[in-house]
Image (cartoon, coloured by chain):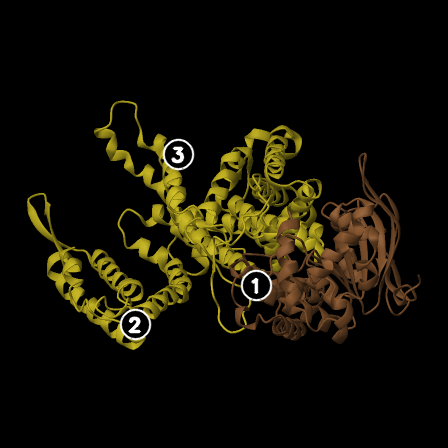
């Protein structure tokens, strides 16, 4: 099955293996993430999704395999050979964290300026020009604040710009983390459970934000998520992991009907698959299949209620 | 002091006056005090071998008047600005924040003014002309050291227990360059000028040592970092003691004291006093030294404040908040940590060089661990990252140290062999325990944001991380 994401992928993961001592967290994983597409990485807890992210963003060095980030101009970066901060700096991969990692004691605006560190550092003449009050740096800083304002507007945080990041409510912190990642001007955005802990209205807003990032900014997004309303609603492509191995890869519709996926999520015997799948239909998981993302509201409640049970 | 006490009743209900009104009020208060003090304090009768003489005490009158005026100014700024109690809660709430904002706005200029005037005010107190200046210099050098350490510990969140090593590097750089290398390279004529030439060099050398220390400890955090920096401080001291051929070991090195742009402070032709046609006075040197350390401290303060507003300073603070997030944002944490170590060390080097030029003598004895601990205590007590808090903490800790030296009179009531001076560490330690009980985040617990969109809101210390080492 050669889908459009394989033709000219933004990110190509090939035979990725990550072993911690005797434990194989990821085994021979290969997948592509298309340009201007949202690729979701799903799977039960402990399937190795966050490990994949840590390999892509350089926090772990993979035991085997290649991770290739292909820029549109034809430049390629072998991420498995780069330091974590260089991946963000040169290859333009930004990420968020499952447990939010903001600079809590700094204001929202400061968080967004720290994200533009490398640009500003160069503009400030590696501090010396800035210390002497260079006009060039002031201009660049004003531009950086403009960019920060733009993303604050997109995430609905303009009014909280001067508050400490640690003071924000949970949902706003999640959005701020996305805004901060976007301020690094990335090509590929990796989001680790952006909808965790959000209420239905907030995850609806998140969906809209991610779609606008993809469409208006021509970004590739890689997403780990348990909230099926988010995953099914916005993904172009889904990769399913279980015990570190890929068990399914395709469009949302394909994945939803894949017996291997249902088995992994619900852990049933083969002969019981059919009734369980029917039960899922009854719960509304399949609403999107026929009508697309528009009537999402009824699904949300059931899926987020189900989420409470399945998440740790 | 009856006059001063009476004074406070004078228009005590003045509230939220304009600066012009305050000035008028202060002038009035000063004149009244002068009028009252002239008959009461100005004249003093002295019995001199049977004859009664009249002595005048102008200095005392002036200092008391100054005390009243300054006290009244402080009352205006900090106490009487409060909204009237009778007001409704609605009015009182914004007024309360106004009061705080006034303090924040005025405290730095007021403290600067006090620091500039301090040596002259001290001259008005009989018996304290030299001692007062000495204490002021002493406290000011600790303020500067603590401001330097604040960059490493307060901003970047890297716990450094060996800061005194950089102080030692600065002091020995001054001593060795002045006594051996500069005369060797440039001839003896250079000696009066060495202070100005060595000062930047000492800062540079200390910064280099900061990087040298920084490299091996980059991967360490928290307790481990603290232990390694502690060891580093001890290594520098032990090298200074044992490398006799280079440092003269425990004997120490006598160095020429600082000069006023080449003019030495001495009772001889060609000296500072001679050049300006003044009568030689040992206090000239103390005045000069005080203003030198004041200027160095102001440079440290201003530079640190500017650095905080630059990308590198924001990266330091971000590093303190969350190192992993920093790396995810493409910040090279290695170079960020090294710059923090280097710049913090540089200010330590300046202070060390100043120390040697003031003392005229350096020996390893001056760079023991307790000095690092004291400077760190000042930073922590002041409130991590707060430059203002450090000023208060330094005055409190170093000032109370000096206070214990003045308690000799207690000797009369204390049992034999018990000297108050010996209890100073005990009492300061106790005071610190109590302070940490009541103000666990230090004296000043607000963080000023470095940039704002609409309104500058201070960040509460509860949200600010203390760093992971």
Please state the total of marks drawn on the protein image: 3
Would you place residue B22 above or below residue B78 in this image? Answer: below
Q: Is residue B316 visible?
A: yes
- Between tags 1 and 2, which lies in front? 2
Residue B155 x/y as whole percent: 56, 53
For label 3, the SS is helix
Which quadrant of the view contains residue A203? bottom right
Residue that numbered label 1 is attached to: B306
Q: Separation of disc 1 and disc 2 at Cα?
A: 36 Å
Among the two numbered marks 1 and 2 on one chain, the one whose residue lies closer to the N terminus: 2
Residue that numbered label 3 is attached to: B425
Q: Give residue A110's quadrant in the image.
A: bottom right
Residues tagged by mark 1 and mark 2 found on one chain of the structure? yes
Does residue B267 appear anywhere in the picture? no
Neighbourhood count class around disc 2 (C-alpha, 10 Å): few under 14, some 14–19, many 20 upward: few
N-terminal label among 3 and 2: 2
Cα distance, mark 3 to mark 2? 47 Å
Residue ID at (47%, 62%) = B458
Marks 3 and 2 belong to one chain: yes
Percent of width and height locating residue B436: 41, 43
What residue sits right under mark 2 in the picture?
Answer: B91
Report the front residue among A48 and B198: A48
């Amino acid at each position: 099955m050669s889908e459009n994401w394989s033709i000219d992928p933004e990110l190509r993961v090939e035979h990725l293996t990550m072993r911690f001592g005797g434990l194989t967290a990821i085994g021979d994983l290969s997948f592509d993430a298309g340009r201007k597409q949202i690729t979701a990485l799903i799977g039960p807890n402990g399937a190795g999704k966050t490990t994949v992210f840590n390999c892509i963003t350089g926090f772990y060095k993979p035991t085997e395999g290649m991770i290739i980030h292909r820029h549109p101009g034809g430049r390629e970066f072998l991420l498995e050979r780069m330091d974590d901060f260089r991946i963000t700096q040169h290859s333009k991969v930004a990420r968020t964290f499952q447990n939010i990692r903001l600079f809590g004691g700094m204001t929202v605006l400061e968080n967004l300026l720290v994200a533009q560190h490398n640009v500003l550092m160069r503009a400030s003449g590696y501090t010396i020009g800035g210390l002497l009050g260079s006009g060039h740096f002031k201009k660049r800083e004003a531009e950086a604040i403009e960019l920060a304002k733009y993303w604050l507007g997109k995430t609905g945080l303009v009014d909280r710009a001067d508050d400490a990041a640690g003071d924000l409510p949970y949902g706003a912190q999640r959005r701020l983390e996305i805004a901060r990642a976007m301020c690094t001007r990335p090509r590929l955005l990796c989001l680790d459970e952006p909808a965790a802990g959000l209420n239905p209205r907030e995850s609806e807003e998140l969906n809209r934000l991610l779609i606008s990032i993809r469409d208006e900014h021509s970004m590739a997004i890689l997403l780990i998520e348990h909230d099926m309303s988010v995953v099914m609603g916005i993904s172009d492509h889904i990769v399913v992991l279980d015990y570190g191995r890929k068990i399914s890869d395709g469009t949302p519709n394909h994945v939803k009907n894949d017996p291997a996926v249902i088995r992994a999520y619900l852990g049933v015997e083969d002969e019981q698959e059919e009734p369980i799948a029917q039960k899922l239909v009854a719960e509304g998981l399949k609403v999107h299949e026929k009508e697309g993302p528009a009537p999402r509201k009824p699904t949300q409640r059931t899926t987020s209620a189900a989420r409470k049970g399945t998440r740790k | 002091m009856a006059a001063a006490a009476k004074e406070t009743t004078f228009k005590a209900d003045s509230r939220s006056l304009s600066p012009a009104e305050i000035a008028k009020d202060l002038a009035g208060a000063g004149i009244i005090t002068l009028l009252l003090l002239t008959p009461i304090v100005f004249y003093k009768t002295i019995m001199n071998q049977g004859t009664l003489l009249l002595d005048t005490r102008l200095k005392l009158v002036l200092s008391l008047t100054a005390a009243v005026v300054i006290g009244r100014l402080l009352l205006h700024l900090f106490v009487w600005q409060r909204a009237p109690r009778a007001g409704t809660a609605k009015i009182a709430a914004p007024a309360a924040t106004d009061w705080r904002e006034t303090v924040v706005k005025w405290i730095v200029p007021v403290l600067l003014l006090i620091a500039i005037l301090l040596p002259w005010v001290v001259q008005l107190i009989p018996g304290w002309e030299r001692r007062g200046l000495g204490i002021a210099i002493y406290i000011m050098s600790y303020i500067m050291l603590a401001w330097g350490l604040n960059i490493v510990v307060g901003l970047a969140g890297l716990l450094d227990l060996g800061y005194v090593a950089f102080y030692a590097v600065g002091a020995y750089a001054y001593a060795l360059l002045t006594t051996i290398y500069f005369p060797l390279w440039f001839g003896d004529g250079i000696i009066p000028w060495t202070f100005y030439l060595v000062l930047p060099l000492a800062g540079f050398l200390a910064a280099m040592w900061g990087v040298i220390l920084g490299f091996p400890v980059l991967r360490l955090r928290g307790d481990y970092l603290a232990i390694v920096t502690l060891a580093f401080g001890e290594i520098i001291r032990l090298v200074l003691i044992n490398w006799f051929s280079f440092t003269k070991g425990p004997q120490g090195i006598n160095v020429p004291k600082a000069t006023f742009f080449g003019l030495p402070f001495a009772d001889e032709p060609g000296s500072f006093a001679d050049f300006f046609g003044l009568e030689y006075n040992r206090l000239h040197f103390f005045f000069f030294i005080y203003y030198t350390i004041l200027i160095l401290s102001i440079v440290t303060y201003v530079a640190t404040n500017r650095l905080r507003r630059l990308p590198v300073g924001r990266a330091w603070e971000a590093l303190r908040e969350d190192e992993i997030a920093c790396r995810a944002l493409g910040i090279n944490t290695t170079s960020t940590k090294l710059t923090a170590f280097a710049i913090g060390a540089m200010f330590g080097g300046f202070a060390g060089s100043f120390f040697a030029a003031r003392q005229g003598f350096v020996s390893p004895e001056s760079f023991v661990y307790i000095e690092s601990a004291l400077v760190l205590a000042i930073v922590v007590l002041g409130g991590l990252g707060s430059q203002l808090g450090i000023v208060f903490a330094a005055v409190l800790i170093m000032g109370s140290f000096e206070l214990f030296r003045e308690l000799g009179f207690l000797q009369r009531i204390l049992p034999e062999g018990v000297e108050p001076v010996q209890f100073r560490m005990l009492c300061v330690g106790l005071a610190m325990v109590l302070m940490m009980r009541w103000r666990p985040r230090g004296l000043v617990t607000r963080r000023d944001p470095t940039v704002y969109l609409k309104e500058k809101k201070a960040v509460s210390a509860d949200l600010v991380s203390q760093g992971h080492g």
